[in-house]
Image (cartoon, helix red, strand yellow):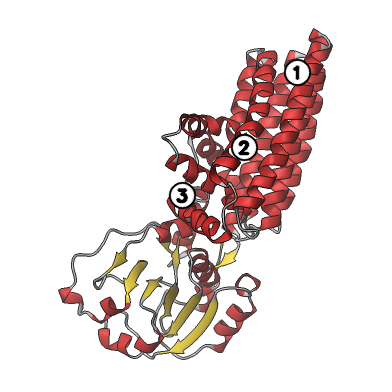
């Protein structure tokens, strides 16, 4: 897909200044963010139209940006006085336009999910200050013959300092995932102030992940003491560790710093934090209730190790090496399609309980109610059931597929969950 972005003559436009073009929004210069968002939405090429003179410093800054060093391909064109509402101006660049393209205002702050929702318009959109997905022929239609303007897309136009602040708040508030449930959404709401602050620092998502692990270690130590108050403190610390897990993902998406390594690293740290948690609780319960609690802890350990191994293998088998973060979206899509099977239906309805963002709430609840022994027995059952079901779904969904079939299946599942 092609994205088209036009820059007005900043000598004539009061809001299109060099300062605003590269004003940092959540740590990323505005114009760089606009282009990077288009790339995340699927744009392989960006046609950047200069309506005034050709400012070489802007093109140089874009070409030197590390965030844009790999993709998309940038193409610059000078069209003096370019007006998107004028069909004749589009005629001047008709040869450069693809059959379908994304029109994106240079100062529109949004995310890829909002751009994915845009319908393809067969007519002139009428308004050019908001994004639109267009057919090439539609831009040559006169505005007066086009239907009423479509509904305004999600996002905010950055035109002043106040709108920049509003854009940052919007980005942070929408830095989750489409599949977030009520628990995760609540967690992310708690994290918003910290995340927005961190976007303007050099703190990396992986550093936040490490902090979450350190908090998890302290949490396990508190649980291992075996007292009620230390267990409650351990639960609150584990909840804080879970919030770190939300922060690193939100920060990675806002700063476009998510990576395959970060996905795998976060996953392994999450698994380690679970093992520390259950190990600490098992030791604490052993001190209070006797050696049978160590057997329960051992059952959780075995189940957790098998689950990690099987799911890691399944993730590698079912996703592209550069997109391991899309594993859950793919599995959810396959389970939704397979709801006629009662096992798939039940698994899809209860799998949310295994997410760390959800589980941290129940750790606090069971700790406050003094029901940690019950939680451990449920965890032992769930941990071993998880790897058994993972093997079952591996055979059901990925039984010796041909590479091309698997790729098509992956793309279809990913589209369902955009």
Disc 3 target residue: 417
Position in image of residue 128 (x %, y %):
32, 72
Disc 2 target residue: 390
Of residue 358 and residue 352, the one placed in the foreground of this image is 352
Label 2 and label 3: CA atoms lie apart by: 20 Å
Disc 1 target residue: 296
- In the displayed structure, does residue 134 sit left or right of residue 344? left
- Above or below for 401 versus 106: above
Q: Residue drawn 19% across and 72% down?
A: 146
**Disc with the residue nearer the chain's start (3 vs 1):** 1
Q: Residue 122 carries which label?
A: none
Q: Tags 3 and 1 in contact by the CB under 8 Å rule?
A: no
- In the displayed structure, does residue 253 sit left or right of residue 2? right
- Above or below for 265 versus 15: above
Q: In which quarter of the image is residue 220?
A: top right
Q: Tags 2 and 3 in contact by the CB under 8 Å rule?
A: no
Badge 1 crowding class, 10 Å Cα cut-off, few under 14, some 14 to 19, many 20 or more, is some
Is residue 247 visible to us here?
Answer: yes
């Amino acid at each position: 897909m092609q994205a088209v972005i036009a820059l007005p003559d900043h000598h004539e436009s009061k809001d299109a200044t060099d300062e605003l073009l590269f004003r940092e929004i959540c740590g990323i210069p505005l114009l760089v963010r606009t282009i990077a968002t288009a790339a995340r939405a699927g744009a392989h090429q960006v046609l950047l139209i200069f309506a005034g003179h050709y400012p070489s410093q802007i093109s140089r800054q874009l070409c030197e940006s590390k965030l844009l060093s790999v993709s998309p391909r940038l193409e610059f064109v000078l069209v003096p006085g370019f007006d998107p509402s004028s069909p004749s101006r589009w005629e001047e660049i008709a040869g450069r336009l693809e059959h379908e393209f994304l029109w994106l205002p240079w100062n529109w702050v949004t995310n890829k999910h909002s751009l994915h929702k845009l319908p393809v318009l067969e007519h002139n959109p009428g308004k050019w200050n908001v994004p639109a997905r267009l057919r090439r022929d539609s831009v040559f239609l006169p505005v007066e013959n086009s239907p009423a303007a479509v509904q305004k897309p999600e996002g905010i136009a950055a035109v002043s300092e106040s709108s920049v602040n509003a854009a940052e708040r919007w980005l942070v508030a929408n830095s989750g995932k489409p599949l977030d449930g009520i628990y995760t959404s609540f967690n992310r709401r708690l994290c918003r102030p910290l995340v927005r602050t961190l976007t303007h620092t050099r703190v990396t998502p992986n550093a936040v992940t490490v902090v979450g692990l350190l908090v998890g270690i302290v949490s396990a130590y508190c649980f291992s003491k075996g007292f009620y108050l230390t267990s409650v403190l351990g639960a609150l610390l584990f909840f804080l560790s879970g919030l770190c897990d939300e922060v690193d993902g939100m920060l990675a998406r806002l700063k476009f710093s998510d990576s395959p390594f970060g996905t795998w690293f976060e996953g392994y740290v999450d698994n380690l934090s679970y093992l520390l948690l259950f190990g600490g609780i098992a030791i604490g319960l052993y001190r209070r209730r006797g050696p049978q609690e160590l057997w329960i802890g051992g059952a959780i350990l075995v189940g957790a190790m098998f689950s990690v191994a099987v799911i890691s293998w399944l993730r590698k088998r079912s996703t592209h090496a550069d997109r391991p973060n899309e594993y859950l979206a793919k599995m959810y899509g396959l389970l939704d399609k397979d709801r006629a099977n009662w096992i798939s239906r039940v698994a899809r309805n209860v799998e949310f309980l295994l997410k760390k963002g959800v589980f941290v709430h129940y750790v606090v609840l069971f700790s406050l109610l003094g029901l940690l022994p019950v939680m451990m027995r449920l965890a032992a059952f769930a941990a071993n059931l998880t790897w058994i079901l993972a093997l079952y779904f591996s055979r059901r969904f990925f039984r010796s597929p041909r590479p091309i079939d698997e790729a098509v299946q992956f793309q279809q599942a990913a589209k369902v969950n955009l």
